[in-house]
Amino acid sequence: MKPIINKKAYFNYEILETFQAGIVLIGQEVKSIKNGRISLAGSYIILKEEEFFLIGANVPPYQPKNAPRDYDPKRFRKLLLKKSEIKYLIGKSRQMGLTLIPLKVYTKQQKIKLEFGLAKGKKKADKREKIKKREIEREIRTFRFAQEP
């Protein structure tokens, strides 16, 4: 399985730290994710009664015609973390302006893992600055290659 990356997260947020967690899934969700059918766009992680949940991730059914009638592709999915990580994240997530954002989904020893980050939102000016910097670097690279004989 190829890792599924949330590209918007890196553009909209400044990632301070990254963590790895397991996800509680049902059978057909596992098959669907291993086929690369998951969307992390617009998803986030919340704390609810000392447990973390992935919200807004869209996992379509593996076989739409065979899916249970009550299947919800955007249901809450519990994250599996160590107790020490949970305590650390509870403290950090309560700080002003920090959120937990899913970055990528991948397999590790036949288990599906979620990499998420402790993130701080970027302002519009920061995004523009980064785009300008990238364009300048691209122009310098093309100019340098054009002058070499």
Image: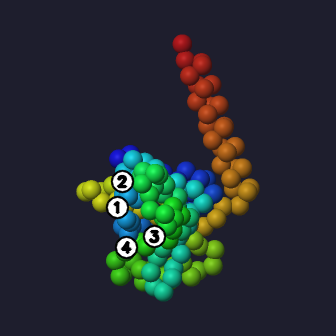
Mark 2 and mark 4 in contact? Answer it, CB < 8 Å. Answer: no
Residue 121, given in percent of the width and then of the height, sits at 64, 65
Reading the image, the residue beneath label 3 is 77
Residue 38, numbered circle: none
Which quadrant of the figure contains the C terminus?
Answer: top right
Q: Which residue is mark 2?
A: 31
**Between disc 3 and disc 2, whose residue precedes?**
2
Q: Secondary structure at mark 3?
A: strand
Q: Is residue 32 above or below residue 25?
A: above
**Residue 54, horizontal then vertical, whole percent:** 49, 69
Counting from the top left corner in percent of width and height, residue 78 is at 43, 73
For this view, does 128 lie left or right of residue 51? right
Cα distance between the residues tagged 3 and 2: 16 Å
Question: In this view of the protein, can residue 116 be seen by the observer?
Answer: yes
Q: Residues within 10 Å of mark 4 (few under 14, many from 20)?
A: some
Real-space Cα distance between discs 1 and 4?
A: 17 Å
Which of labels 3 and 2 is toward the front?
2
Q: What is the x, y in percent for residue 33? A: 41, 53
Mark pair 2, 4: CA separation: 19 Å
Looking at this view, is 71 or 138 the one in front?
71
Q: Name the amino acid, label 2.
A: Lys
For the point 73% across and 57% down, which residue is it? 124
Q: Helix, strand or loop at disc 4?
A: strand
